[in-house]
């Protein structure tokens, strides 16, 4: 097993492992802290909720869970209570580590403690689910080890050893696992942003810690570029950016090369269901010029077996989770004992490169967040007074979602809908606009005419 995380404490002892705001800690300090937490986690096998911000306590708690072989379930502080409760119940977590303060609080849940998972699950990340409940994806140690082996040898990322790795991702999104485990296993310093979205925080952290690598969504990097000073002249240490999570637009790559002429850009692709990412490709100037649609990976160096079946990207093998906690199959299936996952991403493979060109369903990425529009519809439709409801995503000419809009027919006040949505869904899933219609337009098949709604 390559996964001997404890050995990192000795291997990189005096190096800085983590920095966030005023908090900073070395590898030996971090593992000492994590070991103390781990001692209190032994004896039970149920998952552990790591509740809190993107701070040192949460980071140490995550490592403690891995040391004590208990699955960690990251939960953001600002999630509505109802959703939090659902996550506790679905995950069967028996303990909450409240990491909101530097001193971690240990809170027992009502779930019965039992050896449920045979210790095979490293973490559980919850994503938007189409039925109205969040979907729990258990990622096993085998999945995670496979991912770590892949990302630490991924070129050109593997050239950057013991370096600063800036990450804005919340621990509850799978992009964070790329930053956490790449950084840890390469002896790096994770420069974690608190997620306040504060422009000053981003650039003062970068100036102070001088990270060579950024792990980011394209949305985040576009935001950074709004600062005219964000360029190679003022930030000469920035050498590489690892993108994952949403479509990387050519216009963004062009803009980055203009500001950072020598930067190395990686476009990585993968869903939470297959441990963060399964393939990647360096986007060079040549690729930018030649390709109409930027590829998302090279087949020969992928972490999973990847095929395009009937225009859909399918993943197989060690990266792929065994399936949702709820038991609902979704895109999961087995083939000769192997875990397989139909991603729902439309794509194709050409000359050994993988391309992704949109979704087969109503899943979208908005500001880097994964959202099932049907989950929002499920919440609104369940309200008394709602007759019909459809939620659509308005996109800009480049295909990026700019606005989530709900259309509702029935007799229900907007405030009631908003109240319910904010009880059940995270802020980013709540439609900016709710429009009332006498009835929703139907197409000739009798289904809601979403194309027409896009025009309204
Ligand atoms: P998540 O589970 O949040 O990582 O979201 C996974 C989904 O994000 C994938 O199924 C794709 O739809 C999308 N995605 C991830 N990486 C890329 C990429 N490089 N290009 C296009 N879409 C991507």
Image (spheres, rainbow, N blue to C red):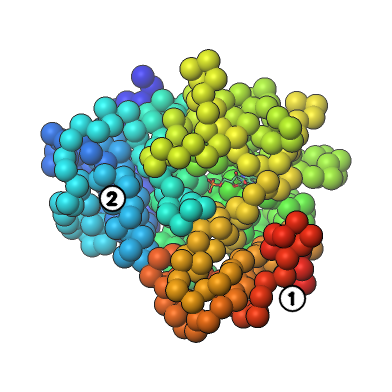
Q: Which mark is residue 258?
A: none
In this picture, residue 291 sits left or right of residue 308: right
Q: Which mark is residue 89?
A: 2
In which quarter of the view is residue 377 placed?
A: bottom right
Q: State whether label 1 is within 8 Å of ligand 1.
A: no
Above or below, 112 relative to 20: above
**SS for dot 1:** loop
Res 332 visible = yes
Residue sitting at x 39%, y 42%? 326
Quickly name the residue at label 1: 456
Above or below, 32 relative to 200: above
Residue sitting at x 56%, y 72%? 387
Crowdedness near tag 2: few (<14), some (14–19) or many (≥20) residues, C-alpha within 10 Å: some
Residue sitting at x 77%, y 72%? 455
Crowdedness near tag 1: few (<14), some (14–19) or many (≥20) residues, C-alpha within 10 Å: few
What percent of the width, then of the height, locates residue 179? Answer: 47, 44
What percent of the width, then of the height, locates residue 84? Answer: 32, 58
**SS for dot 2:** helix
Res 32 visible = no
What percent of the width, then of the height, locates residue 122? Answer: 35, 35
Compare marks 2 and 1 and give the one earlier in the sequence: 2
Question: Most extreme residue toward the right, as rendered?
Answer: 290
In this picture, residue 223 sits left or right of residue 421: right
In this picture, residue 75 sits left or right of residue 428: left
Above or below, 453 relative to 256: below
Residue sitting at x 47%, y 83%? 415
Q: Nearer the viewer, residue 234 or 421?
A: 421
Q: Nearer the viewer, residue 362 or 353?
A: 362
Q: Quadrant of the N terminus?
A: top left
Above or below, 133 relative to 69: below
């Amino acid at each position: 097993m390559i996964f001997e995380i404890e050995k990192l404490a000795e291997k990189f002892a005096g190096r800085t492992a983590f920095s966030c705001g005023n908090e900073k800690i070395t590898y030996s300090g971090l593992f000492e802290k994590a070991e103390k937490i781990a001692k209190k986690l032994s004896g039970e096998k149920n998952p552990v909720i790591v509740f809190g911000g993107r701070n040192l306590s949460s980071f140490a708690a995550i490592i403690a869970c891995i040391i004590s072989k208990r699955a960690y379930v990251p939960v953001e502080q600002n999630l509505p209570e109802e959703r939090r409760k659902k996550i506790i119940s679905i995950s069967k977590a028996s303990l909450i580590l409240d990491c909101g303060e530097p001193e971690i609080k240990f809170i027992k849940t009502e779930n019965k403690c039992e050896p449920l998972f045979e210790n095979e699950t490293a973490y559980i990340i919850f994503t938007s689910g189409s039925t109205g409940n969040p979907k729990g994806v258990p990622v096993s140690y085998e999945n995670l080890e496979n991912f770590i082996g892949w990302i630490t040898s991924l070129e050109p990322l593997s050239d950057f050893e013991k370096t600063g790795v800036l990450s804005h991702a919340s621990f509850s999104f799978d992009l964070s696992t790329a930053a956490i485990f790449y950084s840890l296993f390469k002896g790096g310093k994770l420069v974690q942003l608190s997620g306040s979205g504060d422009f000053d925080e981003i650039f003062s952290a970068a100036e102070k810690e001088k990270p060579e690598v950024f792990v980011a969504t394209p949305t985040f990097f576009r935001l950074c570029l709004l600062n005219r000073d964000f360029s190679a002249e003022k930030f000469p240490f920035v050498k590489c950016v690892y993108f994952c999570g949403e479509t990387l637009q050519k216009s963004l790559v062009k803009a980055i090369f203009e500001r950072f002429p020598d930067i190395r850009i990686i476009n990585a692709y993968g869903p939470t269901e297959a441990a963060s990412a399964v393939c990647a490709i360096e986007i060079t100037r040549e690729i930018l010029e030649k390709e109409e649609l930027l590829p998302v990976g090279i087949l020969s160096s992928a972490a999973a077996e990847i095929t395009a079946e009937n225009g859909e990207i399918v993943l197989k093998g060690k990266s792929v989770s065994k399936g949702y906690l709820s038991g609902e199959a979704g895109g999961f299936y087995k083939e000769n004992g192997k875990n397989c996952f139909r991603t729902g991403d439309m794509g194709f493979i050409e000359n050994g490169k993988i391309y992704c060109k949109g979704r087969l369903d109503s899943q979208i990425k908005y500001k880097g967040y994964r959202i099932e529009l049907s989950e929002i519809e499920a919440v609104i439709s369940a309200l008394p007074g709602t007759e019909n409801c459809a939620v659509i995503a308005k996109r800009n000419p480049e295909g990026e979602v700019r606005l989530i809009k709900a259309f509702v027919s029935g007799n229900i006040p907007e405030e009631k809908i908003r109240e319910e949505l904010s009880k059940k869904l995270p802020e980013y899933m709540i439609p900016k606009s709710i429009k009332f219609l006498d009835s929703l337009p139907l197409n000739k098949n009798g289904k809601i005419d979403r194309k027409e709604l896009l025009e309204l």
